[in-house]
Image (spheres, rainbow, N blue to C red):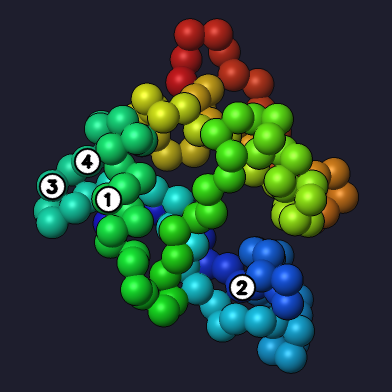
Amino acid sequence: MLDGELGVFDQQLRSRFDWLRHRQPAELATPPVLIAFDVLYVKGRDVSQRPLRERRPRLEDLVAGADLVHASRRLAPNGLEAWAQVLERGYEGLVAKDDDSLYVGGPMRAWLKVKVPGWTQAEHRWQRTLTPGKA
């Protein structure tokens, strides 16, 4: 079982989740595809409590060669280099994840979403205050 979102890509092959409701097919470079962020189960086995560094290769193996399912892109492991790639390539933003993190649905301390201001509408679900000591 995968965790991901349905999305489409523009002509520069940037994911455009917000276009699913508002764009004409001529503006799209791809049909809707599942962009997989994580894997929770592999062959019936729960892997959600394994570190991300173990889950990510499994995710990539599962979606390799699939036409309508893609693993989310990986950027530079250094946060400042990754942010420079976001700006250079014109991406919406990034989600930084701790390689030791276990899977938890929704916002958590080990994952940080950073968006380029004005790229898309604000996502209020990611505007939160985390209580110290809680995931």
Query: In the rendered image of this protein, does residue 4 appear above or below residue 101?
Result: below
Residue 78 marker: none
Whole-percent x and y of residue 134? Answer: 47, 15
Query: Residue 24 is drawn in which quadrant?
Result: bottom right
Which residue corresponds to mark 4?
A: 47
Q: Identify the residue shown where x is 53% and y is 54%.
A: 73
Q: Are marks 2 and 3 in contact (CB under 8 Å)?
A: no
Asked whether disc 2 touches disc 1, contact meaning CB atoms under 8 Å apart, the reply is: no
- Find numbered disc 3 in the image and state the secondary structure of the residue it sits on: strand
Q: Marks 2 and 1: which is nearer the front?
A: 1
Bin the neighbour count of mark 2 within 10 Å (Cα to Cα): few under 14, some 14-19, many 20 and up. many
Judged from this view, the residue extending furthest toward the left is 44
Residue at label 1? Answer: 58
The three-letter amino acid code for the residue at tag 2 is Val
- Decide if residue 76 is on the left or right side of residue 70: right
**Residue 55 to residue 17: above or below:** above
**What secondary structure is marked by label 1?**
helix
Residue that badge 2 annotates = 8
